[in-house]
Image (spheres, rainbow, N blue to C red):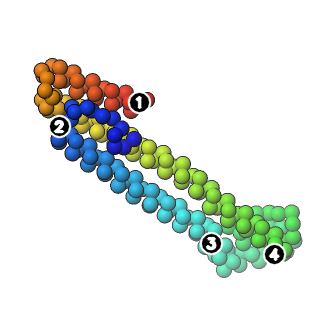
């Protein structure tokens, strides 16, 4: 979607063309802003979960809870139980790396899919705004076409209907 999604074939006046260009530019600006803000928020959440949370757990003394042989790794971003000795540094390192990978890959997948949906919804909304505007100005558009008024109205309406059908496909 975006520029060139539907061609009205010389049935648009200059005001309609200016409105469409403005609507498409505004949509592009919104999508860029939403993408940057959303990615920033998700990355801040990832950093707070994977870095700040273990530091806070350590400062609050959560690592001293329980018994040394209970197998619960409390300093990881998400506390987990392992059947291994929790005093082994390599077990702690392997679990920490695994949780770090999961903590960044999962949100990456989620925000990638979510951004796709948000951008598609923005594009569809913009096309519906354009369609609504072209329907509101159909009489003015018909006056700009070099045909009889009845023929020009039929042509302009048929283009608006085809634009709507293209959106529904």
How far apart are the alpha carbons under marks 3 and 2?
57 Å
Quick one: label 4 or label 3, which is nearer the N terminus? Answer: 3
Relative horizontal placement of residue 9, taking residue 87 as reference (left or right):
left
Read off the residue under disc 3: 51
What is the quadrant of the C terminus in the image? top left
Asked if residue 51 can be seen in this view, the reply is yes
Tell me the distance, in whole angstroms, between the alpha carbons under discs 1 and 2. 25 Å
Mark 4 vs mark 3, CA separation in Å: 18 Å
Q: Position of residue 119 (x, y in %)?
A: 43, 47
Kindly state the secondary structure of the residue where label 3 is placed. Answer: helix
Q: Bin the neighbour count of mark 3 within 10 Å (Cα to Cα): few under 14, some 14-19, many 20 and up.
A: some
The residue beneath circle 4 is 89
Q: Which residue is mark 1?
A: 168
Q: Secondary structure at mark 1?
A: helix
Residue 128 appears at what percent x and percent y? Answer: 33, 37
Question: Between disc 3 and disc 2, whose residue precedes?
Answer: 2
């Amino acid at each position: 979607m975006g520029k060139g999604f539907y061609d009205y074939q010389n049935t648009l006046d200059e005001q309609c063309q200016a409105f469409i260009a403005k609507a498409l530019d505004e949509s592009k600006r919104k999508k860029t802003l939403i993408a940057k803000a959303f990615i920033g928020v998700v990355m801040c959440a990832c950093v707070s979960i994977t870095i700040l949370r273990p530091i806070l757990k350590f400062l609050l003394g959560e690592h001293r809870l329980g018994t040394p042989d209970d197998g619960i790794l409390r300093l990881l971003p998400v506390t987990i139980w392992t059947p291994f000795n929790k005093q082994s540094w390599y077990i702690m390192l392997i679990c920490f790396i695994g949780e770090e990978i999961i903590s960044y890959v999962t949100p990456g997948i989620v925000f990638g899919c979510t951004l796709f949906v948000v951008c598609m919804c923005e594009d569809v909304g913009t096309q519906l705004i354009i369609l609504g505007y072209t329907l509101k100005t159909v009489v003015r558009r018909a006056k700009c076409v070099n045909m009889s008024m009845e023929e020009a109205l039929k042509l302009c309406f048929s283009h608006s209907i085809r634009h709507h059908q293209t959106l529904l496909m």
